[in-house]
Each structure stands twice: as C-alpha cells, then as structure tokens.
Amino acid sequence: MQNGGIMNKREPIKTAFLYGVFICYIVLLMNILFLSRISIFELFNNERTLFRSINLIPFYSIMEYISGSSEITNTLAFVNVAGNIVIFIPLGIYLPLFKNDKRAITNLLFILIVSLFVEITQGLLGIGASDIDDVILNCFGGWIGILGYKFSLFILRDEKIVHTAITILSAIIGLPVTLYFLFIIKMRF
C-alpha cells in the first residue's frame, strides 16, 4: 500500500516533466520551422524582402534532390529530407501520451494538420518554401513516432511502463538534445 502511495506522488512530477520537455520541443520546432531563416524582429519588419516558393506536386522536390549531381546538393538534400522526417518523430511519440484518443489514424491526421498549417504559414509569411513534400516527410516522421509508441506498448504491455520509459528517454536524450539545439547552437529568436 505504501509503495502505491509513492508511485501516485511521482505521477504528477513525471507528467509535469514530460510536459516541460514537450514544451521545449515545441519551442525548438517553432525555431526550426519559422525562425531558422529570419529572427522574430525581422519577421515583423515591413521592409524585408519576402521569399515565397510553393510546390504542390508530390515528390517533385525529393526527385530534384535525388537527381542532383553535386556533393553539396546531395548533402543539402539529405539534411532537408532527413530533417523533415526527424523533427516530427517526437510529435508522433508524445501525442499518444497526452491525448485520450490513442488511435494512430487520428494522431496522424493531427500531424498532417499541423504540418499543413506550418507550410501555409511559411508561405503566407514569406519565410521559406511551402512544399507538399515537406508535409509528406513530416507525416512520415510523425508516423515513425506513432509506430515507435505502439511498438513500445506492444513490447512493454503496460501504458504506465511505456509512459515511464518515454519519460526516462526524454530526460536522457530528448531534453539534452533540445536544449543543445536551442541554446548551444543559438538558434534565432
């Protein structure tokens, strides 16, 4: 009985920690997606030059990257493709933790909506290319995260244990990596 009381007292701390890491991740995501090319002060400067590019043809950008011949183009392509996948994996992992609806399709739909919102906002604000390929890659990354959560649940067979495991991994990997990118690399604010 006493052990159960200790576990219940740790639950709010664990949840608060996960929310804290998730908030840091969202701040990093906002920096990468919206402020990596311009600072927040430049964003609202009405004299800045807007850059708008829109691609609505699925896999067009990815095929352009694949057919690129220079080493610089190939490196840039890899960073863009891998980056668009990797930055949405945590969202796919965290969504089932925080939402009551744990169905993969509803979480993937949420990721699709977030990704579409990001691409439309980038286009409207003139802070990057709006690209359907980014939406596809973001959804793929989110899907990897959702599958990672589902696989963990299948292996560990207990949602509380999965929650604890993700909390531990967030402490060991997630928070240090997020803070590294936010403060060490000094992404633009």
Image: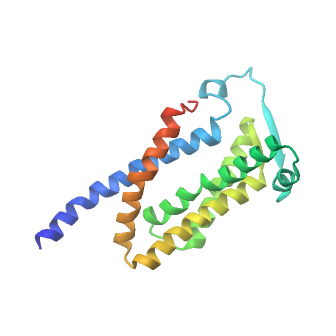
Residue 124 relative to residue 58: left or right = left
Q: Position of residue 109 (x, y in %)?
A: 63, 65
Give the residue at x 57% y 45%.
Answer: 29
Residue 126 sits in which quadrant? top right
Question: Residue at the spot x=48%, y=39% of the render?
Answer: 180
Residue 172's spot in the image, x, y percent? 40, 52
**Visible residue check, residue 175:** yes
Disc tally is: 0
Please indicate whether residue 172 sits to the left or right of residue 122 in the image: left
Q: Is 114 located above or below residue 4 in the figure?
A: above
x 74%, y 39%: residue:
128
- In the image as oriented, which residue stretches furthest toward the left? 2
Whether residue 102 is visible to the viewer of this picture, yes or no, is no
Q: Residue furthest top?
A: 47
The percent position of residue 183, horizontal first and vertical second, equals: 48, 33
- Taking 93 as reference, is 120 above or below it? above
Quadrant location of the N terminus? bottom left
Give the percent coordinates (x, y) of residue 13: 28, 54
Asked which quadrant contains residue 91, the reply is bottom right
